[in-house]
Image (spheres, grey):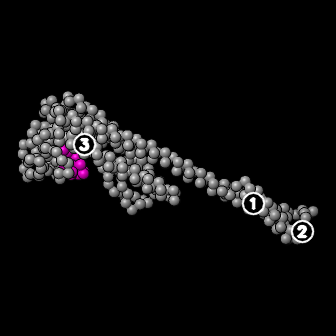
Protein backbone atom coordinates (compact mmCIF):
# COMPACT_ATOMS: atom_id res chain seq x y z
CA UNK A 1 0.00 0.00 0.00
CA UNK A 2 1.31 3.43 -0.98
CA UNK A 3 -0.30 6.68 0.21
CA UNK A 4 0.65 10.29 -0.46
CA UNK A 5 0.25 13.14 2.06
CA UNK A 6 1.01 16.83 1.81
CA UNK A 7 0.73 19.74 4.22
CA UNK A 8 -1.45 22.67 3.18
CA UNK A 9 -1.08 25.51 5.64
CA UNK A 10 -1.35 23.84 9.04
CA UNK A 11 -3.21 20.72 7.92
CA UNK A 12 -1.78 17.56 6.41
CA UNK A 13 -4.09 15.96 3.86
CA UNK A 14 -4.03 12.85 1.74
CA UNK A 15 -3.46 13.52 -1.97
CA UNK A 16 -4.18 11.22 -4.89
CA UNK A 17 -1.06 11.86 -6.96
CA UNK A 18 2.62 12.25 -6.24
CA UNK A 19 3.64 15.88 -5.67
CA UNK A 20 6.91 17.54 -4.79
CA UNK A 21 7.27 18.09 -1.07
CA UNK A 22 4.89 15.30 -0.08
CA UNK A 23 5.22 12.46 2.38
CA UNK A 24 4.98 8.96 0.91
CA UNK A 25 3.78 6.27 3.30
CA UNK A 26 4.53 2.69 2.21
CA UNK A 27 3.14 -0.30 4.12
CA UNK A 28 3.85 -3.91 3.11
CA UNK A 29 4.50 -3.07 -0.55
CA UNK A 30 3.89 -5.51 -3.39
CA UNK A 31 6.60 -6.29 -5.93
CA UNK A 32 5.04 -3.76 -8.30
CA UNK A 33 5.09 -1.08 -5.60
CA UNK A 34 8.72 -1.92 -4.77
CA UNK A 35 9.63 -1.37 -8.41
CA UNK A 36 7.83 1.97 -8.32
CA UNK A 37 9.91 3.03 -5.32
CA UNK A 38 13.18 1.93 -6.90
CA UNK A 39 12.67 2.77 -10.59
CA UNK A 40 10.25 5.71 -10.53
CA UNK A 41 11.24 7.46 -7.31
CA UNK A 42 14.88 6.41 -7.50
CA UNK A 43 15.24 5.10 -3.95
CA UNK A 44 18.37 3.06 -3.29
CA UNK A 45 17.31 -0.63 -3.58
CA UNK A 46 19.26 -1.55 -0.43
CA UNK A 47 17.30 1.08 1.51
CA UNK A 48 13.99 -0.50 0.51
CA UNK A 49 15.25 -3.97 1.34
CA UNK A 50 16.61 -2.91 4.75
CA UNK A 51 13.35 -1.14 5.68
CA UNK A 52 11.36 -4.32 5.01
CA UNK A 53 13.67 -6.62 7.00
CA UNK A 54 12.03 -7.61 10.29
CA UNK A 55 15.40 -8.31 11.89
CA UNK A 56 16.96 -4.97 10.89
CA UNK A 57 18.25 -2.99 13.87
CA UNK A 58 18.14 0.77 14.26
CA UNK A 59 20.81 2.69 12.35
CA UNK A 60 21.40 5.62 10.00
CA UNK A 61 22.96 5.37 6.54
CA UNK A 62 23.83 7.85 3.79
CA UNK A 63 24.35 7.16 0.08
CA UNK A 64 26.63 9.66 -1.67
CA UNK A 65 25.70 8.58 -5.18
CA UNK A 66 21.94 9.02 -4.71
CA UNK A 67 22.21 11.77 -2.05
CA UNK A 68 19.73 9.91 0.13
CA UNK A 69 19.63 9.26 3.87
CA UNK A 70 18.06 6.20 5.47
CA UNK A 71 17.04 6.24 9.13
CA UNK A 72 15.79 2.96 10.56
CA UNK A 73 14.24 3.07 14.03
CA UNK A 74 12.54 0.38 16.07
CA UNK A 75 9.02 1.26 17.15
CA UNK A 76 6.97 -0.58 19.82
CA UNK A 77 4.03 -2.71 18.82
CA UNK A 78 1.30 -4.40 20.85
CA UNK A 79 -0.85 -7.20 19.51
CA UNK A 80 -3.33 -9.63 21.00
CA UNK A 81 -2.27 -13.26 20.85
CA UNK A 82 -4.20 -16.38 21.78
CA UNK A 83 -2.44 -18.34 24.49
CA UNK A 84 -2.84 -21.85 25.88
CA UNK A 85 -4.16 -20.70 29.24
CA UNK A 86 -5.69 -17.31 28.36
CA UNK A 87 -8.24 -16.47 25.72
CA UNK A 88 -6.39 -13.33 24.58
CA UNK A 89 -3.20 -11.76 25.93
CA UNK A 90 -1.27 -8.65 24.93
CA UNK A 91 2.14 -9.32 23.45
CA UNK A 92 4.63 -6.47 23.08
CA UNK A 93 7.45 -6.42 20.56
CA UNK A 94 9.43 -4.01 18.37
CA UNK A 95 9.52 -3.66 14.60
CA UNK A 96 11.71 -1.61 12.22
CA UNK A 97 10.49 1.51 10.43
CA UNK A 98 12.52 2.89 7.53
CA UNK A 99 12.53 6.64 6.85
CA UNK A 100 14.16 7.79 3.61
CA UNK A 101 15.09 11.47 3.17
CA UNK A 102 15.65 12.44 -0.46
CA UNK A 103 15.29 15.49 -2.67
CA UNK A 104 11.63 16.55 -2.77
CA UNK A 105 10.21 13.71 -0.67
CA UNK A 106 10.23 11.94 2.65
CA UNK A 107 9.27 8.26 2.55
CA UNK A 108 8.29 5.96 5.42
CA UNK A 109 8.53 2.22 4.72
CA UNK A 110 7.30 -0.54 7.04
CA UNK A 111 6.06 -4.11 6.91
CA UNK A 112 3.01 -3.46 9.08
CA UNK A 113 0.65 -0.62 9.85
CA UNK A 114 1.51 1.15 13.09
CA UNK A 115 -0.15 3.71 15.32
CA UNK A 116 2.70 6.23 15.03
CA UNK A 117 2.24 6.64 11.29
CA UNK A 118 -1.53 6.70 11.76
CA UNK A 119 -1.22 9.53 14.28
CA UNK A 120 0.92 11.51 11.83
CA UNK A 121 -1.56 10.94 8.99
CA UNK A 122 -4.69 11.80 11.00
CA UNK A 123 -3.34 15.05 12.41
CA UNK A 124 -2.93 13.90 16.02
CA UNK A 125 0.66 15.12 15.89
CA UNK A 126 0.70 18.91 15.64
CA UNK A 127 3.31 21.09 13.98
CA UNK A 128 4.34 18.75 11.16
CA UNK A 129 5.08 19.91 7.63
CA UNK A 130 5.85 17.45 4.85
CA UNK A 131 8.24 19.87 3.14
CA UNK A 132 10.29 20.27 6.33
CA UNK A 133 11.82 16.81 6.24
CA UNK A 134 14.08 17.07 9.29
CA UNK A 135 11.28 18.40 11.50
CA UNK A 136 8.92 15.70 10.18
CA UNK A 137 11.51 13.04 11.05
CA UNK A 138 12.02 14.39 14.57
CA UNK A 139 8.26 14.67 15.18
CA UNK A 140 7.87 11.02 14.16
CA UNK A 141 10.76 9.98 16.42
CA UNK A 142 9.20 11.91 19.31
CA UNK A 143 5.88 10.12 18.74
CA UNK A 144 7.64 6.75 18.75
CA UNK A 145 9.47 7.54 22.01
CA UNK A 146 6.17 8.60 23.61
CA UNK A 147 4.59 5.34 22.45
CA UNK A 148 7.35 3.46 24.26
CA UNK A 149 6.43 5.25 27.49
CA UNK A 150 2.73 4.45 27.02
CA UNK A 151 3.41 0.75 26.50
CA UNK A 152 5.86 0.62 29.40
CA UNK A 153 3.16 1.96 31.74
CA UNK A 154 0.76 -0.67 30.36
CA UNK A 155 3.34 -3.38 31.06
CA UNK A 156 3.76 -2.08 34.61
CA UNK A 157 -0.01 -2.20 35.21
CA UNK A 158 -0.27 -5.71 33.73
CA UNK A 159 2.65 -6.84 35.87
CA UNK A 160 1.01 -5.50 39.06
CA UNK A 161 -2.33 -7.10 38.14
CA UNK A 162 -0.70 -10.46 37.44
CA UNK A 163 1.25 -10.24 40.70
CA UNK A 164 -2.00 -9.76 42.66
CA UNK A 165 -3.45 -12.84 40.94
CA UNK A 166 -0.35 -14.84 41.87
CA UNK A 167 -0.85 -13.94 45.53
CA UNK A 168 -4.23 -15.68 45.39
CA UNK A 169 -3.35 -18.71 43.27
CA UNK A 170 -0.12 -20.08 41.82
CA UNK A 171 -1.31 -20.97 38.35
CA UNK A 172 0.68 -21.49 35.17
CA UNK A 173 -1.16 -18.83 33.17
CA UNK A 174 -0.04 -16.01 35.50
CA UNK A 175 3.56 -17.20 35.45
CA UNK A 176 3.51 -17.49 31.65
CA UNK A 177 2.09 -13.97 31.36
CA UNK A 178 4.84 -12.64 33.63
CA UNK A 179 7.39 -14.40 31.44
CA UNK A 180 5.84 -12.78 28.35
CA UNK A 181 6.08 -9.32 29.94
CA UNK A 182 9.70 -9.95 30.87
CA UNK A 183 10.43 -10.92 27.26
CA UNK A 184 8.70 -7.74 26.04
CA UNK A 185 10.93 -5.62 28.27
CA UNK A 186 14.01 -7.29 26.80
CA UNK A 187 12.82 -6.34 23.29
CA UNK A 188 12.12 -2.78 24.41
CA UNK A 189 15.46 -2.39 26.18
CA UNK A 190 17.47 -3.60 23.18
CA UNK A 191 15.56 -1.44 20.70
CA UNK A 192 15.69 1.68 22.88
CA UNK A 193 19.46 1.45 23.20
CA UNK A 194 19.94 1.15 19.43
CA UNK A 195 17.48 4.02 18.87
CA UNK A 196 19.52 6.13 21.28
CA UNK A 197 22.71 5.46 19.29
CA UNK A 198 20.92 6.49 16.09
CA UNK A 199 19.66 9.72 17.70
CA UNK A 200 23.16 10.57 18.91
CA UNK A 201 24.42 10.20 15.34
CA UNK A 202 21.65 12.51 14.12
CA UNK A 203 22.55 15.03 16.82
CA UNK A 204 26.07 15.39 15.41
CA UNK A 205 24.49 16.94 12.31
CA UNK A 206 26.81 15.27 9.82
CA UNK A 207 24.32 13.00 8.04
CA UNK A 208 21.15 15.10 8.50
CA UNK A 209 21.16 18.89 8.42
CA UNK A 210 19.79 20.26 11.70
CA UNK A 211 18.29 23.74 11.99
CA UNK A 212 18.25 25.81 15.17
CA UNK A 213 14.63 24.92 16.00
CA UNK A 214 15.35 21.24 15.42
CA UNK A 215 17.98 21.09 18.16
CA UNK A 216 15.41 21.60 20.91
CA UNK A 217 13.09 19.03 19.35
CA UNK A 218 15.90 16.49 19.08
CA UNK A 219 16.81 17.08 22.73
CA UNK A 220 13.16 16.40 23.67
CA UNK A 221 13.31 13.11 21.78
CA UNK A 222 16.53 12.12 23.58
CA UNK A 223 14.98 12.99 26.96
CA UNK A 224 11.98 10.77 26.19
CA UNK A 225 14.26 7.93 25.04
CA UNK A 226 16.42 8.20 28.17
CA UNK A 227 13.31 8.17 30.35
CA UNK A 228 12.01 5.10 28.51
CA UNK A 229 15.37 3.32 28.98
CA UNK A 230 15.34 4.06 32.73
CA UNK A 231 11.73 2.91 33.09
CA UNK A 232 12.49 -0.24 31.10
CA UNK A 233 15.46 -1.07 33.35
CA UNK A 234 13.45 -0.45 36.53
CA UNK A 235 10.45 -2.52 35.41
CA UNK A 236 12.74 -5.28 34.14
CA UNK A 237 14.56 -5.51 37.49
CA UNK A 238 11.28 -5.49 39.43
CA UNK A 239 9.74 -8.15 37.19
CA UNK A 240 12.86 -10.31 37.34
CA UNK A 241 12.91 -10.05 41.14
CA UNK A 242 9.22 -10.89 41.33
CA UNK A 243 9.67 -13.94 39.10
CA UNK A 244 12.57 -15.15 41.27
CA UNK A 245 10.55 -14.59 44.44
CA UNK A 246 7.56 -16.54 43.16
CA UNK A 247 9.84 -19.32 41.90
CA UNK A 248 11.23 -19.57 45.45
CA UNK A 249 7.69 -19.59 46.91
CA UNK A 250 6.62 -22.37 44.55
CA UNK A 251 9.72 -24.40 45.41
CA UNK A 252 9.09 -23.84 49.14
CA UNK A 253 5.45 -24.90 48.79
CA UNK A 254 6.57 -28.08 47.04
CA UNK A 255 9.03 -28.80 49.86
CA UNK A 256 6.25 -28.32 52.46
CA UNK A 257 3.97 -30.73 50.59
CA UNK A 258 6.74 -33.32 50.36
CA UNK A 259 7.52 -32.90 54.07
CA UNK A 260 3.87 -33.43 55.09
CA UNK A 261 3.56 -36.49 52.84
CA UNK A 262 6.76 -37.93 54.34
CA UNK A 263 5.46 -37.44 57.90
CA UNK A 264 2.13 -39.09 57.00
CA UNK A 265 4.01 -42.01 55.42
CA UNK A 266 6.09 -42.49 58.59
CA UNK A 267 3.00 -42.43 60.82
CA UNK A 268 1.14 -44.87 58.56
CA UNK A 269 4.15 -47.22 58.57
CA UNK A 270 3.98 -47.76 62.37
CA UNK A 271 0.89 -50.08 62.31
CA UNK A 272 2.54 -52.14 59.55
CA UNK A 273 5.63 -52.63 61.73
CA UNK A 274 3.53 -53.67 64.76
CA UNK A 275 1.32 -56.09 62.81
CA UNK A 276 4.38 -57.52 61.07
CA UNK A 277 5.80 -58.58 64.45
CA UNK A 278 2.52 -60.30 65.37
CA UNK A 279 2.39 -61.98 61.97
CA UNK A 280 5.65 -63.82 62.61
CA UNK A 281 5.78 -67.40 63.90
CA UNK A 282 7.38 -66.44 67.20
CA UNK A 283 6.35 -66.88 70.79
CA UNK A 284 6.50 -64.61 73.80
CA UNK A 285 4.82 -61.55 72.25
CA UNK A 286 2.54 -59.68 74.71
CA UNK A 287 -1.19 -60.00 74.25
CA UNK A 288 -2.01 -62.82 71.87
CA UNK A 289 -5.54 -61.42 71.33
CA UNK A 290 -6.33 -59.17 68.34
CA UNK A 291 -6.99 -55.93 70.20
CA UNK A 292 -3.55 -55.78 71.86
CA UNK A 293 -1.51 -55.11 68.68
CA UNK A 294 -4.22 -52.74 67.52
CA UNK A 295 -3.97 -50.78 70.77
CA UNK A 296 -0.16 -50.76 70.59
CA UNK A 297 -0.31 -49.47 66.99
CA UNK A 298 -2.80 -46.73 67.90
CA UNK A 299 -0.73 -45.60 70.90
CA UNK A 300 2.47 -45.56 68.79
CA UNK A 301 0.74 -43.57 66.01
CA UNK A 302 -0.62 -41.12 68.57
CA UNK A 303 2.82 -40.62 70.15
CA UNK A 304 4.47 -40.16 66.74
CA UNK A 305 1.78 -37.70 65.63
CA UNK A 306 2.17 -35.71 68.86
CA UNK A 307 5.95 -35.51 68.43
CA UNK A 308 5.64 -34.37 64.79
CA UNK A 309 3.03 -31.76 65.74
CA UNK A 310 5.28 -30.41 68.50
CA UNK A 311 8.04 -30.02 65.91
CA UNK A 312 5.57 -28.26 63.56
CA UNK A 313 6.09 -30.84 60.84
CA UNK A 314 2.54 -30.61 59.47
CA UNK A 315 2.94 -26.99 58.21
The disc at residue 142 is: 3
Of callouts 1 and 2, the N-terminal one: 2
CA gap, disc 3 and disc 1? 68 Å
The disc at residue 216 is: none
User: Would you say 126 lies left or right of 289 here?
Assistant: left
User: Would you say 288 lies left or right of 12 here?
Assistant: right
Residue that badge 2 annotates: 288
Of callouts 3 and 2, the N-terminal one: 3
CA gap, disc 3 and disc 2? 92 Å
Which residue occupies the foreground of this view, 153 or 88?
153
> Does any portion of residue 27 appear in the rendered image?
no
* Vertical arrangement, residue 103 with respect to residue 11, above or below: above
Q: Are marks 1 and 2 in contact (CB under 8 Å)?
A: no
Residue 114 is a magenta residue: yes
Neighbourhood count class around disc 3 (C-alpha, 10 Å): few under 14, some 14–19, many 20 upward? many
* Residue at 56%, 51% in the rendered image: 249
Neighbourhood count class around disc 2 (C-alpha, 10 Å): few under 14, some 14–19, many 20 upward? few
Residue 309 is a magenta residue: no
- SS state under label 1: helix
Q: Are marks 3 and 1 in contact (CB under 8 Å)?
A: no
Residue that badge 1 annotates: 305
* Residue at 32%, 52% in the rendered image: 78
Residue 65, given in percent of the width and then of the height, sits at 13, 30
Residue 156, given in percent of the width and then of the height, sits at 40, 50
* Vertical arrangement, residue 249 with respect to residue 206, above or below: below
- Indicate the quadrant containing the C terminus: top left, top right, bottom left or bottom right: bottom right
* Residue at 21%, 34% in the rendered image: 215
CA gap, disc 1 and disc 2? 26 Å
Q: In the image, which is nearer the foreground, mark 3 or mark 1?
A: 3
Residue 29, given in percent of the width and then of the height, sits at 18, 49
Outermost right residue: 284
Amino acid sequence: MIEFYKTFGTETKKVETLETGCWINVVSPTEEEKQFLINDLGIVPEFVQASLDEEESSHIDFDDDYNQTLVIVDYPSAEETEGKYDKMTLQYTTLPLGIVLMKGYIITISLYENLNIEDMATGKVKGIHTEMKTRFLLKLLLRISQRYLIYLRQIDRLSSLTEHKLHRSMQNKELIQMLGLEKSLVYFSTSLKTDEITLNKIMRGKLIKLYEDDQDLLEDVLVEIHQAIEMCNIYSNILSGTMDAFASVISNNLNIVMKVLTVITIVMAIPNIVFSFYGMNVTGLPGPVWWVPTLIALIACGVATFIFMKKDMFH
